[in-house]
Every structure is written in C-alpha cells, then in structure tokens.
Image: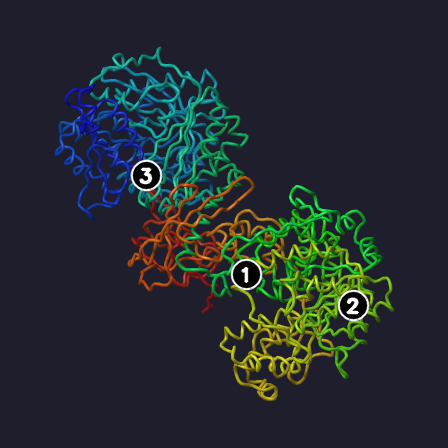
Amino acid sequence: MNAKKFSGLRDNFSLLGERNKILVANRGEIPIRIFRSAHELSMRSVAVYSHEDRLSMHRLKADEAYVIGEEGKYTPVGAYLAIDEILAIAKKHNVDFIHPGYGFLSENSEFAKKVEEGGITWIGPPAEVIDSVGDKVSARMLAAKAQVATVPGTPGPIESVEEAVEFTKQYGFPVIIKAAFGGGGRGMRVVREGDDVADAFQRASSEARTAFGNGTCFMERFLVQPKHIEVQLLADNYGNVVHLFERDCSVQRRHQKVVELAPAKALPLKVRNAILTDAVKLAKTAGYRNAGTAEFLVDNENRHYFIEINPRIQVEHTITEEITGIDIVAAQIQIAAGASLDQLGLLQDRITTRGFAIQCRITTEDPSKNFQPDTGRIEVYRSSGGNGVRLDGGNTYAGAIISPHYDSMLVKCSCSGSTYEIVRRKMIRALVEFRIRGVKTNIPFLLTLLTHPTFVRGEFWTTFVDDTPQLFQMISSQNRAQKLLHYLADLAVNGSSIKGQIGLPKLKTHPTIPRLHNSNGEVIDVIATPPPSGWRQVLLEHGPDEFAKRVRQFDGCLIMDTTWRDAHQSLLATRVRTYDLAAIAPTTAHALSGAFSLECWGGATFDVAMRFLHEDPWKRLRILRRLVPNIPFQMLLRGANGVAYSSLPDNAIDHFVKQAKENGVDIFRVFDSLNDLDQLKVGVDAVKKAGGVVEATVCYSGDMLQPGKKYNLDYYLEVTEQIVKMGTHFLGIKDMAGTMKPAAAKLLIGSIRAKYPDLPVHIHTHDSAGTGVASMAACAVSGADVVDVAVNSMSGLTSQPCMNALLASLDGEINTGIKTSHARELDAYWAEMRLLYSCFDTDLKGPDPEVYDHEIPGGQLTNLLFQAQQLGLGEKWAETKKAYKEANYLLGDLVKVTPTSKVVGDLAQFMVSNKLTSDDVRRLANSLDFPDSVMDFFEGLIGQPYGGFPEPLRSDVLRNKRRKLTNRPGLDLAPFDLESVREDLQDRFGDTDECDVASYNMYPKVYEDFQKIKEQFGDLSVLPTKNFLSPPEIGEEIEVTIEQGKTLIIKHQAVGDLNRETGMREVYFELNGELRKIPVVDRSQKVEVVSKPKADGHDSYQVGAPMAGVIVEVKVHKGSLIKKGQPVAVLSAMKMEMVISAQADGQVKEVLVNGGDNVDASDLLVTLEDAVPRKEN
C-alpha cells in the first residue's frame, strides 16, 4: 500500500498556485466549514485554538494547529481576540490567507488592516469598508448616502445614560440599545416603558465590550412584530456585486437567530425585489468586497428599513448555499485571491433559487429555563442524516466537553427540499433523529416551534418566540436509556441503595410465568384469550348498590386475594414491584376470575412505591387495571388521613379518592385506626361522592372473649350500628393483629348476621397466631360474604391465611368460586417471588401465639422486629414485645391499626431504649421528650380514642407544649388550594396531572424526593427486579422494554479504575451495540474534593448560578431587604451577561461569591431568610 499521506492528494490539484495556505482565526463549527471548502480548493489549512479549546474538533480537522499563547496568558475568549498573537502564528507558519469566520475578530477593522499590512491576504472586505459598514452607526450614514430608508435612531453612538434617556423622551418607547460592533444578539437590550434605561444601557455596553472588545452602542426605535430579512451579497475586487437572494431570519431569541428560512416565504414579490435592489445599491455605494449580508426590517405594512451590513460570513449562509448551489466560502477565498465574479460564473442572471431550505441552530440550552445555557460532557451523540439534511458542527461527539466560555451552539442542521412544507417536515424528522445526552439542548423547543400553526404558515416575526408562550409547552426527550444506564452504573459501583435490603436476591434467573390448564387439561393462552367475566362486570353493569346485593345473594363465601398488597407488606416489607405484579397479572385475571376482589393499592404500598421502589403508584394502578379488567380492585383508605398517617383537609381526601376511582379502584376499605366514626365518615363520604363501593370498616383489637376486655361484643355491635346508619355497601372487619379466634369469629359474625341479615360482611385477618384458616372458615360458616386470603407462598405468619388451605377447609361445604387447581398453579410464580425478594424477607420461623397477649398487628410485627434490629435492640426483642403491651395500656388500650399501632410501637421502643417501666413513664412524663407520634396522639391529631385519653398522663406528656383537641383534627385544617399546588408542581417538575397533585397532598417530601430520583434515573419500574436490586455482572445482557415495541439491550462491559482526584469511576456498557461510558462517584472511597455548596432548586430562599460562568457584579450584601425578581448578581457566560434575580421576598442572610469569581451551574450564590422588620428610631 502506498504510504503517501491523504493530504498529499491535494498537492497536484491546487487552484491557487503556491499561495494556498489558509488560517481560520476562529473556533467551533465555522473553521471546520471553511477548511472543507479550502481542502476542495487543494489548500492547506491552519487552525488556532485557546488552551481551553485544546480538545476542540476544529483543531483536528486542520492540517496544522497552533495554540494561542501560553496557558493562562489569555482568557478563553481573549485568546481569539489576540490580534498580534494570531498574526505571529500566521507569519511563523507561512500562512497566505486569513479567514476570520464570524464573531470574534471578523468585524474588527484593525485586524483586517494588520493582516494586509503583514503581507497576508484578508478574506473579507478591506478595513476601510468594515469601518464604513461594520458598525451600525456608520451603516446609517451609508444608508443616507445610498438613499435607503432606515429605522429612526441616534445619528451616532451614545456615550452616556443621559443621552439614552433623552432619546426615549424624543421618540418614546419601545427602543432598542444595540452594540455598534458585532452581532449574534449580544449587546442588545429592548427597553419598554417603565424599564430601567440606565441598567439596560450599562448591561448592553458591558456585554458588547466583553464579546467584541468595544462597548460602543447606539439606539433606535423598536419596531413591533417586524420581519427580519437579510440579503446574501458577493462582491469582487472590480466593483461587481451580486445577490444570492434573501433569507428570513425572523425567528429569534435574545435577538439571536434560532431558525432561518431561504428564500422568505411570506414576502410579497414587489417588496422582495425592492430589498434585493437596495442591498446591491448599498454594497456598491460602500465599495464592498467579498461576502457580506445586508439586513433589513420589514414592518407590518411591508415597508422595509435597512439595519446594517454584516461584513462577514453569516452562521446561516448554509441555507443560501442549499437553494442556489453556490459554495459561498469557496467564492470568498477565490475572490480574495483575485478572481472576478465573471470568472467564477457568478453573474446575476445566472443565479437562481431552487426550492426552500431551513436551518435550525441546535444549542446546548434549556428552553424551559429561559434558554439557560448548559455545560458539561456530551455522554451520547447520535446525529441525523439522509436526503436533504446537512450538518455543520463543531465539538459534536460523545465525550466532548461543552465549556461555559463560548457560544452554546452545538450543530447547525440545514434541510432542503422542493417546497416549504416538505422542508419543514424534513427538519422535524431530522431533529427527532438526534440523540444528545449529557447536556440539555433546545431540540424540544425547535420541534414545538416547527409544528406551531404560525410557523406552518410561514408568518413569523422577530418577537414571535417572546410573544408565543405556547412554544414553551414542549415535549421533551425522555432520555430514558441514558438515565437507566446511570442507575445500573451506580448499582455496579456502589451496590443497591434500596432501604431495608439485606444481601442479594436468591433467585438468579428471571421468574417463570406458570401455565394454567382448563378442565380438559389444555393450556389456557392467558394473553390471547380474554379472561372470564367476573364480579367487576357485575359492578360496572349494575352499580355499587346492586353489586353489594348480588354478593350478599351469592351462595357461598367469596375470597379477596391480598397477595398484591397486604401479603407482601407483611412478609416482604412492601417491596414487590409493579414489574412483577404486571408479569403475573394476565394469569391472575384467569386464575382468580371468581374472586370478590384483589387488594392491590393504598395503605403503605402507596408511599413505599415512591419512597423505596422509586416508582409511581398511579402508574401501577393503571397498568394492573388494564391487565385485569374482570376482577374488582380494592384499596385501603385511612379515613380522614387518605393514605397518609395524619389528618388532611377534607377536600384533599375527596380529591384523592376521585383520582383513585377514575384510575381503577373499585372498592374502598375505609377505616379509622381508633374507630373514630367522625374520622371514618370523611373517607366514606369521599367514596360516595366518587361513585365507588364503600366498605366502612370496624377495626378489631385483642381477644374479645377475654372477660373484662374493653373491646367486646357489645362494643363491636355498637360500632356496626353506627356504620350502618352512616351508610355503607359492605361492612369490613379488620383484624390487624390476627387475634380473632374461631370461637370469637362465630360469635361476632353470627351476631352481626342475625341483626343485619342483608348487610354484606367482609373479614380481614392476619395469620400471626397460626389460627387464621380456622378463623376464616368459622367466619364463612357463620355467614360472612368475603374473607381475605393470600396465595400459598405468600401466606401464613404475619400475612393472611393460606388460600388453598381455606379452599380445602370449605371444600364440599361452602362455594368460593375459585378453582383449586388454578390457585395452586398460580402459586408457583409466588414461590419464585419469595426467592427474588429474599433480601427483604422476614426471619420469622413460625406462628406467634403470643399475639393474643402483646396484640402486635401482623404487618407491624415484622416492621417492629426490623426497626428494633436497626436501633440495636434486636437482642431485646422479647423485652420489646413486653414493652409494647405495657405501652398499649399506658395509652389507654388502643385499637392498634396504622397509625395508632405506630404510636404504641414508638413508645415501646422509647421505653426499651431508655430502660423505662410503665411506672417510670407515668412518674417522669412531665420531663421526658416523647417521640413525635406519641405527642401527636395525645394532642388529638390522630383522633379521639374510645373511652377518652388517659389522665393525668395526657396532661403531663403535653405539658402545655401542645393543645388538646376535642374534635376531629381536619375541622381545624384549611382546605388545600389544589390549583396552586398544581401550578407549583408544574413549575417545578414539568408535566403535572391530578394524580401528581394527589400524591403531593399525601406526601409532599416523599413526592419531591421521588421526582428527583425520576429526573436522575428515569422510570425505574421498567427494569427487571433482579437488575433493580443486584449489580450487573460483567458480560451480562439485560433486556429492558421501555414501551411497546421498544426494547433496550444492555450489556455490562467493565468498571474503570478509581480517579483519586475526583473519586469517580467510569462504567462501560453496550447499549444496543453502541458503547456508552457512565461516570459514577464511588461512595466507598474517601476522596477530598473541594466543591462549592449547591443551591436547592426547590428552595426559593436559595439563589443559585443558572449556569457556569464568571460573576461580573454582586448587587446585594448581607442584610439587604429584597423583593422577588430583584437582581442579586450579574453573571457572564457564553459571551453574554445575564441578571440573576431573587425568587422570593426576603432578607439576604449570606453572600457566598464576589465579583470575578468563577462558578459552576447551581453553585449557591446567595441565601435569603424571612425579612426582619426594622425598628423605628
């Protein structure tokens, strides 16, 4: 193979002779664009770069590349403004041509002059022409000379704030302050009536000085809703000028173009021709040379006004190239080398357009945060392509660092086609194909813009973006795959962070879905075959009242399966995930089609789903409802608490229940932990309003057969009578501790049945004592309509009685509507689940008949044991159980159901931890600091206990620190402003529905934390449970279905070495065959990293840096009283300045930065506190 370099291929084909070496004094995408044309002309290319740009792509695309100055000599922007340094590089390396690109020195006449004086050819207009057109004040003089209309403005630059104020007095508002040199939207401020003219002038001048090295500004009248039309010009050295037609650049943000169109769509032919004629006239009047752009504004009466000539190549030149077929950069170079337009074939009558072209500037900005620029590492970059798609990019590759020092543009996407509509659709397709991860981009905004009716018609104007808030109702890329990789990478490095997990799952394979067989022994296709009609069809067709009647008329006793809620709450710490419930749901719909209901939602499963499983409980409900259309769903509702642990305003309960009903819950088991009927009624009424099935419930506590027991038969019959008067479809009896003995079951159910023969009765128990099957069989025989059980592998101990054992006990005597073989086949899946969730399994070895003595509820028994171990009291478990009994009697012998059971448990642990007896508690009550739950109970926040509060203990515990409520706590609570909650969540977390509002009302902090995890890792519910809990193994292939028809194939490749400076490791994956590298902090390593505190974006009293940059000015000091929206600091970043404002009224508590400090995104700048009123002298 010939070893000749590729660059040598150009040696024999040079069009410019020996003078063929070109340097581009710029960075990013434009040098690469220029190099490409230069290489096609067989030229050699030279790049220059700052120290910060040493990894930039433009350096690698050139034949030669040289750093501008030594490290630290220049600022990142200053390097590209260092005229003498750049010229020295050019001379040292025998450069023949210098192209300035756009921005930086492209409009600097001093640079152009020095280049020419140094014997190097300047690709652009000569210095004197730049002076005559390059600043906007001189351009106005040029227009007057050429007799072209301009917008009313100052005749020259304004030197002071007083001049700016005087102009507004003469011409009125609005006005615009513009940098005389430069463009790109920097150094521009629109000032409307009531705005601070002085501040706008200072900001524009300062920004212009930073970006262009010259802070000169001028002012002009600001036109309302004009179009921005620009004409591409080419002029040779011999006085010839042609136009390449116009571009519509009206879609702008911060006066910076976002989307450009060529040619303009909504421009009358007469106006177009007049603009093109004026553009050529202006260029000839100025003696223009090389490429330039004449810019005009067109008002709503189609009058056009000249703004300026940009004496350089424009960012959007690409779309003119696409519609004319002319390489503008190649023409620039050849004109500079002496070619005439005629020699290049560029005569006006030969230049035509074909079709349309649109350019979108893809930037690293977050449109949802006022286009706040984003910085960081690009983790994933997958570009678009195909017919009619052109990409011009700079640092567009995975691993590239987006710096805060430069412009935020990442890549220009230009699409061309025969009609405007074809091009618009092509651009949408192209943008959707992009995958950019690691930094935010404006692609969601661009897609919303391209589909807006105004853009579809092509009738946009310069303030269209500002005038159209609907553009910010964007559909954002979900970034699902990358977020999941971040979770798996963290799992690989740091292990599982799921609270309560001990060890790893024992099941190493994916669980098997069991097969069901019909009576002929044939396998039932549970996916293709609709499940048999069940009790839900009865409910949907006939309504709650008739549904209850038909259940009561059923000849037998129905069952409710608690496997999907209380069973795994009792045995597996409520940790079973939606992924595994959904997998078995179709099989369950067939196997248990005759069941009264499935208990699948509410209670602790609601907050645990968000808190520990990082998944949305509402999404779980909707998924399961879709998969099980035939069996009623039942949830647990804590009366006036909803699914929270304390009382909430009544409207919050109504709102929550309404959402639950609409999303799939049919039957609501409503209870109050104290059997407080006022509290219970809140939940019952909410269910009635929502149209659900009411199962008002009496909580059963202790052994009612025990002589002298507070909660005896008379008590339960009295409560039942009150519930019947209240109105309910079903009576629920909730035996949380499993203390209902078979004899008690016969007595209680028999008595209720005798008194209320038409009332459907539903019994719930726990099998803590091992007598659950016998007790439920006794209930069934005594007239109960529904009893609770769990599948075999999820039953017994602190869970519900065994389903198959109960079916066997009732076989031949009482019909349950359940096929025993199907229940048994279904159980095979849950046997594997016990292995999969073994890391949460309790260590109970068998029944605990002591429950009749200590009365600890089943679910709490396992939780209390776990908590005791966490608190170092594991070896004192027997003492804890004894203390629980004592604590119960100290509190007055409570009905023990969540949350009252928690009160008793907390007091018991408090007593064991502090070595206190019940006598000690009574004696020292006025000096002890009791747990909050105990204080809440005695205050009355949980409700009013049967028989009242124990005195004097209540008074001693409260010690006047808290009030003594005598009525329902919710009566004192103001209704939630649901609309305000919705708006707040929308502002903070984006797309928000009524379910989000309901979740937040129940658990504000839990919901906020869940949203943070979701933002970090995405929807984790789609991960297989093995991969959710266990670190991925090297070489392991994981399939993750993120939606129907979309499956990610993830393969774990390696974990990198520890970076001892940052404490990070890089974890390597293949995602659908593409290598991905994820950085992760190794939390096991102690690495001292100096970092600044970060602002909490959800705390309005913390003001953070919106992006990385330099603090130009701090406008407040400690103790300052400020208002919401008042500036606190000015930040310079990406060649622009932005004012950082307070998000709330308050007083400055601390200022953490000074002018000149470098900051990163989210660095805490200022903290506020409640304003302290100033004392009058």
Q: Nearer the viewer, mark 3 or mark 2?
A: 2
Please tell me which residue lies in front, 740 or 323: 740
Residue 553 % position (x, y): 85, 57
| Residue located beneath label 3 in the image | 395
The residue where tag 2 is placed is: 779
Of the pair 1124 and 369, the residue shown nearer to us: 369
Gap between marks 2 and 1 measured at Cα? 33 Å
Q: Amino acid at mark 3?
A: Asn
Image quadrant where residue 834 sits: bottom right
Residue 674 visible from this viewpoint: yes
Q: Which of the marked residues, 3 or 2, is nearer the chain's N terminus?
A: 3
Where is residue 877 shown, x and y percent of the image?
56, 79
Q: CA distance from mark 3 to mark 2?
A: 73 Å
* Residue 988 in view in this figure: no
Left or right, 502 with reference to 333: right
Q: Amino acid at mark 2?
A: Cys
In the structure shown, which secondary structural element does the residue marked by tag 2 occupy?
Answer: helix
Q: According to the image, label 1 marks what residue?
A: 835
Residues at marks 1 and 3, CA–CA distance in whole angstroms: 49 Å
Q: Identify the element where label 3 is drawn.
A: loop
